[in-house]
Amino acid sequence: MDIYRAPDSRVIHPSILYFGTPVVLITTRNPDGSTNITPMSSAWALANRVVIGLAGGGQGLANLQREGECVLNLAGEDLHEAVERMAPTTGAAPVPDWKRAIGYRHETDKFSLAGLHALPSLGVGAPRIAECPLQLEARLLLAIERPLEAWRDGAGGYVMAELEVLHVHAHDEVVAPGTQHIDPQRYLPLFYLFRHYVGRGAAHGRTFKAEV
Ligand SMILES: Cc1cc2nc3c(=O)[nH]c(=O)nc-3n(C[C@H](O)[C@H](O)[C@H](O)COP(=O)(O)O)c2cc1C
């Protein structure tokens, strides 16, 4: 009989737990009608719902709570440089103290900064990002404000937001021909993995439910 020997392990205290989730660029409308882009990655999907986590004090969060809608633009792995150009910025003015202290600056035009282009949406006011292979128009169903004492940056808290996806826009090149399905061989999302940008790597098979 084989005796299983567990890998050696230890208890550690990492400063963050970003274990690898897709990079989403959230477009929202500012009070003056211009568009903000919020890079984020704390997101998961179930059926036509997406739940996201956003730190307090951000412009995208304020816009989402005020207007009740947004577009979740899923970044492809080719967009990592564009995402990083926006990373040290916020649409919020004044810049919250804790963000200014770690190098954030105010930015009104993240499209130009990142070299991205806007496309009108069907059902929400905020535009889509043309370069993103998947763009999900969504409306806010629920926002739960939560304190987060452990947040060393001092953001003060975060919001768990439940969104209902209204329309899914997909680049032709990521759709399996003749179907309504995303082809995982063609779709190359960008992931945020412990503060590094990575691609999806090799495929390792499919579940019994896979449709393409
Ligand atoms: C790749 C990446 C992932 C991020 N993920 C999140 C996230 O999941 N939640 C969050 O609140 N902020 C996240 N951030 C930080 C926000 O982008 C940052 O707070 C930004 O200033 C928000 O912009 P806004 O204030 O214009 O909305 C992430 C940043 C990057 C670059």
Image (cartoon, rainbow, N blue to C red):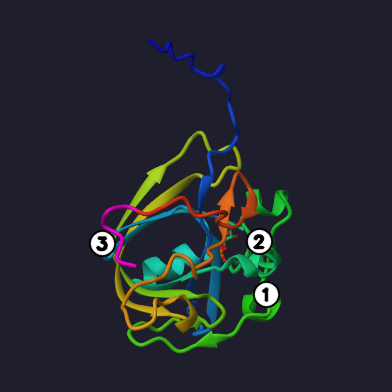
The amino acid type of the residue labelled 2 equals: Ala
Residue 208 magenta-highlighted: yes
Would you name the residue on which mark 1 appears?
114
Q: What label does residue 87 carry, if any?
A: 2
Sequence order check, earlier mark of 1 and 2: 2
Decide which of 96, 88 is in the foreground and name it.
Answer: 88
The nearer-to-camera label among 1 and 3 is 3
Decide which of 165, 180 is in the foreground and name it.
Answer: 180
Residues shaded magenta: 207-212
Q: Is residue 85 left or right of residue 6?
A: right
| Quadrant of the picture in which ligand 1 is shown | bottom right
Gap in angstroms between the C-alphas marked 1 and 2: 10 Å
Would you name the residue on which mark 3 appears?
47
Secondary structure predominantly adopted by residues drawn in magenta: loop
Residue 41: percent from left, percent from top: 50, 56
Decide which of 97, 103 is in the foreground and name it.
Answer: 103
Q: Is mark 2 within 8 Å of ligand 1?
A: yes
Circle 1: is it few (<14), some (14-19), or many (20+) Cα within 10 Å?
Answer: some
Q: In the picture shown, does residue 37 fall above or below 178?
A: above
Sequence order check, earlier mark of 1 and 3: 3
